[in-house]
Image (cartoon, grey):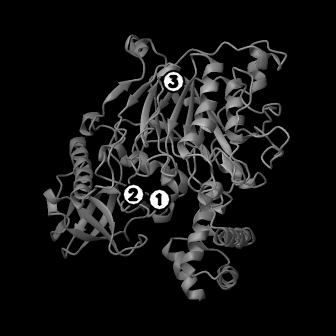
Amino acid sequence: MEDQIRAEFRKNNFVLVEEEAILQKCVTFCINYNLSPSDLVSSWDLYSINRQLELIVSDAHMDAFRQQLQSEQKQAIIEKEQGLHSYTDVTMEIDNDNEDAKEVVPASPTVQKDVNLDSFDVTPLTNGKIHSLGRPLELVTPFGQRKDKFVVHSTLNNLPTVDDIKKEHGEDNSDDDVIKRVQPIKRCSLEIIGSQPARGCRYMYDRIEDKFNYLEDRIMKYSEALVASQLYDELVDPSVASQKTIFSVGMICCEEEGRLKEKPIMLQSSVEHSGGQRVRLELQKLEQFSIFPGQVVGVEGHNPSGHCLIATKIVDYVPLSVPDDTFRQTKRQAVDQDNQLVDPSDVSSDLSLIIASGPFTTTDNLFFEPLSDLLAYARRRQPQLLVLLGPFIDSEHPEIKKGALNKTYDELFRLEVFKRLQDYVEYMGSAARVILVPSVRDAHHDHVFPQPAFDINLADINDQITCITNPGIISANKVKVGCCSVDVLKQLSTDVVSRGIKNRMNTLTNHLLSQRSFYPLYPPAEDTPVDLSLAPEAFQMSVIPDVLVVPSDLTQFVKVLSLEGTSEVKCICVNPGRLARGEGGGHFVEVNFHGSPDCSSASVIRI
């Protein structure tokens, strides 16, 4: 078994230090936890990503790795016995004592700040009452007994605390905030970039033709973009034998079902250039690469036999010199009439926003305490934009899986979520805006991806609560914010094959920007209901967002990333984590955008 484990580590490009001791322990882990060598290495892969480790396996990490395997086994047993899903999975690990957490933002200082918001409970309602379905005052829940409330986990540049804001405004009595309404900040402009698929669309009608057209369109767009850049030679059929160096464009594919492996990897070119044929891709001459199934790349190399393309260079990004009209532009929709009357040149590129992703209630109840505390925090901070990504009514919640509710999912959403948001915007005034992004795990919404926006009657709240598609892009004060609630980072992490990559989390996130796609993976993960008949252009990033929000069960982070091939175009990439984890609290992110990502600040905060 040691040879099999060694081979699996090497296949995934891991280097074993103190090899004999590590292999002995790994054999013990396989026996004790009934794991195959492949499963063991997959668990180590997630462990190393969460801790921002390089591709070096050290004996010093074996004890912590063993604890992770124990946690995995424990959760598996609980789920099997109860038929439940738990958010305390190790892939969502956010241990406050973990010293590696300081590496979430490598180039930024990590500071532990107590925002001192213990007095926050629920967002005050305009009528002074508590929600009928809210937490009874006499009931104490594990979430209510948590410690380290609103502690800053990591920072990007500097973000002022609530106390600093109060001092700036001369506020000494915190009780005044509950009694009087603080004047909100200036209302931001808002524009939706693209609105497909439409509400009420039919799905589960995708055909093989739809999938073919989607993949062919991606390859052709990428080919046209590289040709337009004039940086590479004319495209050639990669399956034709040639002793000369050629340049081809195609999509990375698996030769057989299962996870992508370094051998063999196939390159499928377009129908126009090669009739859609596949050719084996040899990567031995490359010192550094990161590829995954569904990725469209340009490959420079030679194919002496006609059966194997030996790559000497891989281009996995669209050059900056390519004009934007190479990619299909999507329609823009102004949310309110006020935006159409404002000169765009008069709008400053400054935006304050709070970002959180569901679940919004803990697994032991449906009181939605984390959501209430988040809205109380937002009431004090007064962001221009509150971005909330589903799931809101989580289909994986124990109470919902049991089917023990005495109301419909729509009623639960309106009473526990939408009612709280209405009270929040009424309290904050006309300047507050809320963005809602659905999730494929929302029990009250269409189970399909891409996903239409929530169908809610919003006529009575002055366009303050806006529902967008999943994925979707908005423009607020000329700041473009892209959102996708599907855990694409975790899915990519299990399918990517790489060599010579130092920061794997940065690379995973950069794949989305390089491919200009919210979901470049193909075939999609088994639990992601992709329907390409709806709106294949919905996956496309028609513009590079200034802020990219990609919630994931992997470690939460806020990073400034440069677009591949240039340092001029940058993007703030945000993984806010989950607001609720098991019976406890999770994290959310606060961002102050000032003109450009480099001049902006952000914080990952524990709820």
Q: Amino acid at mark 3?
A: Gly
Q: Are marks 3 and 1 in contact (CB under 8 Å)?
A: no
The residue that mark 1 highlights is 492
Q: Quadrant of the N terminus?
A: bottom right
In this view of the protein, can residue 251 be seen by the observer?
Answer: yes
Q: Position of residue 114 (x, y in %)?
A: 80, 35
N-term mark: 3 or 2: 2
Q: Position of residue 336 (x, y in %)?
A: 42, 18
**Residue 466 shown left or right of residue 104 in the figure:** left
Establish if 16 lies above or below 47. below
**Residue 332 shown left or right of residue 338 in the figure:** left
Element carrying mark 3: loop
N-term mark: 3 or 1: 1
Within-10-Å neighbours for mark 2: few <14, some 14–19, many 20+: many
Q: Nearer the viewer, residue 295 or 538?
A: 538
The residue that mark 3 highlights is 595
N-term mark: 2 or 1: 1
Please give the name of the residue rendered at 64% of the width and 25% of the height, measured from the top-left corner. Answer: 423
Quarter-wise, where is residue 185 in the image? top right
The residue that mark 2 highlights is 521
Q: Nearer the viewer, residue 576 or 505?
A: 576
